[in-house]
Amino acid sequence: MVLKALMEVLRKESANEKETSVQQLFILEHFKTELAERITNKAIKERIEFLYDTIGADPIIVAEAVKFAIDLPEEVSINEMTLYPTAQL
């Protein structure tokens, strides 16, 4: 919630100053990353690996979403984007 509020303040200040500024908040869930490799607690590591194997999505999707947001014209802003695998529903 605090991060959303901060992003909104930055957006409003940027608009008031009539300057181009890009702030985007990406909320990511269950994308296959190297996170499980760094976890030392065996039970947590197994749970993360299970989630990745069953519903984890390819992280290239995140890169494509970031590229989409960056490539938008200056007069368009994305304030927040939530990405999650459809299987997570």
Image (tube, rainbow, N blue to C red):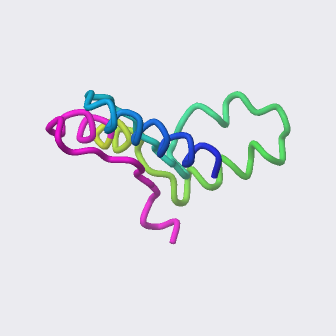
Residue 58 x %, y %? 40, 44
Q: Is-magenta flag for residue 83?
A: yes
Q: Quadrant of residue 16?
A: top left
Q: Would you place residue 51 above or below residue 33 in this image?
A: below
Q: Residue at x 45, y 54 (%)?
A: 82
The answer to whether 85 appears left or right of 5 in the picture is: left
Q: Would you place residue 40 above or below residue 11 in this image?
A: above
Tell which residue pokes out farthest to the bottom in this image.
Answer: 89
Q: Would you place residue 29 above or below residue 32 in this image?
A: below
Residue 78 x %, y %? 32, 47
Q: Residue at x 83, y 41 (%)?
A: 42
Tell which residue pokes out farthest to the front in this image.
Answer: 16
Residue 19 x %, y %? 27, 27
The answer to whether 61 appears left or right of 5 in the picture is: left
Q: Is-magenta flag for residue 13?
A: no
Residue 89 x %, y %? 51, 72
The answer to whether 54 appears left or right of 19 in the picture is: right
Q: Residue at x 44, y 59 (%)?
A: 85
Tell which residue pokes out farthest to the left in this image.
Answer: 73
Identify which residue, 45 or 81, lies in the foreground: 81
Instruction: Give the residues drawn in magenta, as a range.
Output: 66-89
Q: Quadrant of residue 67?
A: top left
Q: Residue at x 67, y 30 (%)?
A: 37
Numbered disc total: 0
